[in-house]
Amino acid sequence: MHLEEHHRIESLTDLAVWRYRTYLHEPGWAGKQITQLVKLHAAEGAPAHEVPVPQYVLSVYELRENSWAGAGLDTALQLLATPSVLVNRQDPENVVSLGPDIEAAKFREGWMHPEALSFGGNVSQGVAGWSGVSYHPQPDERALTTSQIVALELDVQALWALSSHVLHTVEDGHDPVMPPEYGWRFLRSAYTRLTTARPTETAQHRVMREAILTTSELPDRLRAAQDALRDSNP
């Protein structure tokens, strides 16, 4: 499902709060929409099935206007990729701002998250963190497009969800069972595709891919899920 919204923000803290609050209702909204589509297109006489509430929402924010430059842009990209440092999440049902002074202090200090990775080189600037990816393309044809970033993120998040399902099944004391086409050989091929550079891959795409894979820790999860499936379904 693809939900598009337009929103005016006054600060990166406003964006961070809005982002976390959308996580409370967007999965439920998406689940209802998908359920209705399944019912609409189900074969006549077929039993209706409720679609489980989606477990994850991939949010993409396109900032149309900003006033950052130099070190300010570096800090903004860091905060966009790691928004949790701007909010209080002790109550997931009511995420609130830590206050405007926190964001202002981050910009004064030129703050950088210790676990975030910068990428992009001399063409454009990007940051990958556990919570997200930010990117500021320069008006140059070598810069990455939104579609390229989203395509990689969809692959990463889908494989994260699949590997998490397998590993949670193991943690619950059960043998994971998958359709043959999505067994351990599928995960092996997915791991190879994600971690191996292609002849036509640009340098920008390569450094982005490597940064996202490193910060998401997906390769390790894929290998663990692959081993679990191989053990239970040799």
Image (cartoon, grey):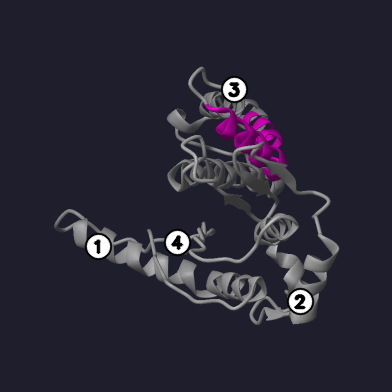
Provide residue 211's location: percent of width, then percent of height. 68, 39
Disc 2 to disc 3, C-alpha distance = 39 Å
Residue 156, visible in the rendered structure: yes
Mark in the foreground, 4 or 2: 2
At label 3, counting other C-alpha atoms closer than 10 Å, the crowd grade (few under 14, some 14-19, many 20 or more) is few
First in sequence: mark 1 vs mark 3 = 1
First in sequence: mark 1 vs mark 4 = 1
Q: Which residue is label 2 attached to? A: 90
Span highlighted in magenta in the image: 202-226
Helix, strand or loop status at disc 4: loop
First in sequence: mark 2 vs mark 3 = 2
Q: Where, by quadrant of the figure, is residue 21 drawn?
A: bottom right
First in sequence: mark 2 vs mark 1 = 1
Mark in the foreground, 4 or 3: 3
First in sequence: mark 4 vs mark 2 = 4
Mark in the foreground, 1 or 3: 3
Q: Nearer the viewer, residue 220 or 51?
A: 220
Residue type pointed to by label 3: Thr
Helix, strand or loop status at disc 1: helix
